[in-house]
Image (cartoon, rainbow, N blue to C red):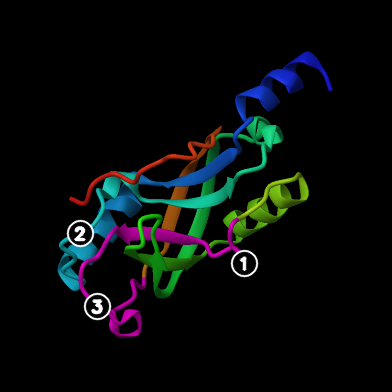
């Protein structure tokens, strides 16, 4: 291990977080769709729309060497309700994104770990929803979503999602 590698490993000592940021155009389209079709009172700020590639409690310092400018396309699959850290529920839009799936597999081979048995590419739409929602009854966007930037950072183990909008 060289000095740069030691430095990168130390930077990621608590783990590594990698996500793909949604393009401005796709954010606007998805936010408009959410406003017009879903009526979510707890929706997230559309500027935070992204898909997580890895949330690894194991350091993956090699992620620092990934290019930051991307173009990745995703298609909406449907919705799912995920549990939150504080025993709440969040509504996510499940997406199929070959780039995110391939990158998740690559980083897993490089040592990334996950708290979940299966990687599910998604975009969080609402945190801590306070009502029951049947995700199977919600309309699904028919347009593609574009992601155009890769973010790599040390894991913030005590990260708290931004407040609902």
Toward the bottom, the furthest residue is 137
What is the spatial separation of the Cα atoms under label 3 and label 1, in whole angstroms? 25 Å
The residue identified by callout 2 is: 42
Q: Is residue 87 found left or right of 112 in the rendered image?
A: left
N-terminal-most mark, 3 or 1: 1
Q: The residue tagged with tag 2: helix, strand or loop?
A: loop
Toward the top, the furthest residue is 3
Q: The residue tagged with tag 1: helix, strand or loop?
A: loop
The residue identified by callout 3 is: 132
Q: Is residue 137 found left or right of 122 in the rendered image?
A: left
Q: Position of residue 90 (x, y in %)?
A: 33, 63
Q: Residue drawn at (65%, 51%), measured in percent from left and top?
A: 103
Q: Is residue 150 above or below residue 142?
A: above
Q: Nearer the viewer, mark 3 or mark 1?
A: 3
Q: Nearer the viewer, mark 2 or mark 3?
A: 3
**Which of the numbered marks, if any, corresponds to residue 71?**
none
Mark 3, Cα crowd under 10 Å, few <14 / some 14-19 / many 20+, is: few
What is the spatial separation of the Cα atoms under label 2 and label 3, in whole angstroms? 13 Å
Q: Position of residue 24 (x, y in %)?
A: 32, 45
Marks 3 and 1 close (CB-CB < 8 Å): no
In this picture, which residue range is highlighted in magenta? Answer: 115-142
The residue identified by callout 1 is: 118
Toward the front, the furthest residue is 87
Using the rendered view, name the quadrant where residue 60 is placed: top right
Q: Is residue 116 found left or right of 83 in the rendered image?
A: right
């Amino acid at each position: 291990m060289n000095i740069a590698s030691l430095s990168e490993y130390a930077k990621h000592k608590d783990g590594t977080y990698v996500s793909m940021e949604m393009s401005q155009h796709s954010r606007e389209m998805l936010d408009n769709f959410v406003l017009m079709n879903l009526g979510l009172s707890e929706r997230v700020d559309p500027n935070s729309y992204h898909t997580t590639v890895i949330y690894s409690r194991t350091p993956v310092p090699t992620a620092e060497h990934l290019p930051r400018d991307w173009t990745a396309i995703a298609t909406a699959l449907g919705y799912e309700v995920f549990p939150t850290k504080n025993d709440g529920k969040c509504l996510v839009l499940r997406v199929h994104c070959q780039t995110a799936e391939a990158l998740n597999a690559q980083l897993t081979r490089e040592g990334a770990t996950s708290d979940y048995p299966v990687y599910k590419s998604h975009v969080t739409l609402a945190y801590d929803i306070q009502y029951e929602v049947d995700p199977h009854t919600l309309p699904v966007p028919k347009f593609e979503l574009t992601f155009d930037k890769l973010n790599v950072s040390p894991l913030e183990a005590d990260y708290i999602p931004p407040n609902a909008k």
